[in-house]
Image (cartoon, grey):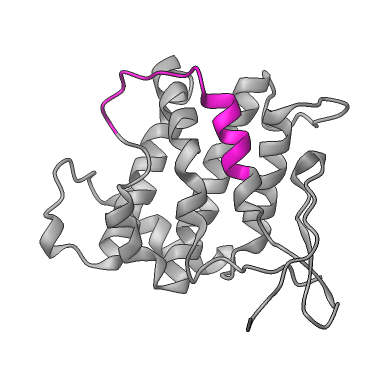
């Protein structure tokens, strides 16, 4: 079989990346363990229900328009990682400046995975300033013209929806919606803006 053959896979606390070996026994580390993310998200969201109608993440069909463009996908995933870091801190009763310390559990592990996600984005955050500024200035599109939207416009809309959710993060329904959508986040990571393998 061509490509990478993963012989060993382990998940450690704090979301440490999975270790794999190529057919030549060269060790490599997955940048973000999407399987671990899905499993942890399912464990924290299994009894979460939300009546919140407004989505935070775009529908997958819409989001795929972004994933083919490294800069757009990368810039959006930086914002996604930052948003979920805030969400998870809220769930743990932590402020933005608090350190994890000796805390343990799935929310802590998910925070670690968000950190890895941020580290694995291919684009430098400084290059996202124009896109972020555009999202701030433009009014939120309540009913997007789906057939006419270009990838950049979808990226702007996704950033706007994350910004809107961030403003309402203290609202219990927004928090529940975020945790509920965390169950599918592993699908959104796949794309040209996020590295599969760690540089280490």
Q: Give the range drawn in magenta.
A: 37-54
Viewed as shown, does residue 174 lie left or right of 194? left
Question: Which is nearer the eye, 107 or 121?
Answer: 107
Q: Quadrant of residue 120?
A: bottom right
- Counting labels gives 0
Q: Residue 95 in the image: state x and y as whole percent.
A: 68, 25
The answer to whether residue 197 is seen in the rendering is yes
Residue at the (67%, 32%) spot, across then down: 96
Q: Residue 141 in the image: state x and y as whole percent.
A: 19, 46
| Residue 38 included in the magenta stretch of the image | yes
The answer to whether residue 85 is seen in the rendering is no
Residue at the (28%, 31%) spot, across then down: 54
134 w.r.t. 143: above or below: below
Viewed as shown, does residue 125 lie left or right of 142? right
Residue at the (43%, 35%) spot, across then down: 181
Q: In which quarter of the image is residue 112?
A: top right
Question: Which is nearer the eye, 12 or 166?
Answer: 12
Viewed as shown, does residue 120 lie left or right of 177? right
29 w.r.t. 40: above or below: below
> Which of the image's four quarters has the N terminus?
bottom right
Q: Residue 139 in the image: state x and y as whole percent.
A: 22, 46
Residue at the (76%, 29%) spot, across then down: 98
Point out the residue furthest to the front here: 1
> Which of the image's four quarters has the C terminus?
bottom right
Q: Quadrant of residue 8?
A: bottom right
| Residue 124 included in the magenta stretch of the image | no
Q: Residue 64 in the image: state x and y as whole percent.
A: 34, 62
Viewed as shown, does residue 38 lie left or right of 181? right
């Amino acid at each position: 079989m061509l490509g990478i053959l993963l012989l060993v896979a382990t998940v450690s606390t704090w979301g440490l990346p999975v270790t794999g070996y190529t057919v030549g026994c060269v060790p490599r580390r997955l940048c973000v363990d999407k399987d671990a993310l899905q499993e942890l998200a399912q464990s924290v969201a299994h009894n979460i229900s939300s009546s919140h109608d407004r989505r935070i993440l775009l529908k997958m069909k819409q989001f795929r328009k972004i994933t083919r463009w490294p800069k757009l996908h990368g810039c959006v995933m930086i914002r996604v990682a930052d948003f979920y870091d805030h969400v998870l801190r809220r769930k743990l009763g932590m402020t933005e400046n608090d350190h994890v310390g000796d805390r343990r559990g799935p929310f802590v592990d998910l925070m670690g995975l968000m950190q890895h996600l941020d580290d694995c984005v291919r684009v430098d955050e400084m290059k996202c300033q124009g896109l972020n500024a555009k999202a701030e200035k433009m009014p939120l599109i309540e009913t997007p013209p789906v057939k006419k939207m270009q990838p950049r416009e979808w990226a702007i809309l996704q950033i706007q929806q994350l910004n809107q959710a961030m403003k309402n993060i203290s609202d219990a329904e927004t928090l529940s919606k975020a945790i509920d959508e965390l169950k599918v986040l592993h699908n959104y990571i796949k794309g040209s803006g996020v590295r599969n393998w760690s540089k280490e």
